[in-house]
Amino acid sequence: MAALFELTIQSETLSADEVASITGCNRRGDQIEWLTANGWRFYKNRGGDPIIGRLYARMQLAGIKPNTDIAGSDQPSFNKIR
């Protein structure tokens, strides 16, 4: 169990090979098309490559919807308290 907490993260963002593995596409334009069609959020670097955060990718692949805002409608409304 201790080994679980000793995992080293190589980078905060996915490598080009990891993005290609997730999307099944090697070409940048095809990767961007797949990411957009499947609702993934990403940024583009100066060269136009998709940049995806590692934690975001882990959540997305686990079925956790990281696209929802924390300050959404689940927050309590205190405006009726006197």
Image (cartoon, helix red, strand yellow):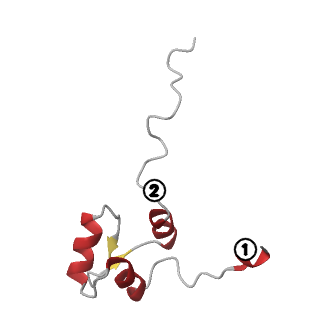
Q: Amino acid at mark 2?
A: Pro
Disc 2 and disc 1 in contact, CB within 8 angstroms = no
Dot 1: what SS? helix
Residue 9 on image: x %, y %: 60, 81
Task: Give left or right: position of 80 versus 49.
Answer: right
Residue 73, compared with residue 52, is above or below; it is above
Dividing the picture into quadrants, the one containing residue 4 is bottom right
Task: Give left or right: position of 78 versus 73.
Answer: right
Residue 45 on image: x %, y %: 32, 79
Residue 44, compared with residue 28, is above or below; it is above
Q: Which mark is residue 5?
A: 1
Mark 2 / mark 1, whichever is N-terminal = 1
Q: Amino acid at mark 1?
A: Phe
Residue 36 on image: x %, y %: 26, 66
Q: For the N terminus, which image quadrant?
A: bottom right
Identify residue for label 2: 66
Q: For the C terminus, which image quadrant?
A: top right
Q: Which residue is the extreme one toward the top?
A: 82
Residue 62, compared with residue 5, is above or below; it is above
Q: Residues within 10 Å of mark 1 (few under 14, many from 20)?
A: few
Which sits in the foreground, 61 or 45?
A: 61
Which sits in the foreground, 67 or 43?
A: 67
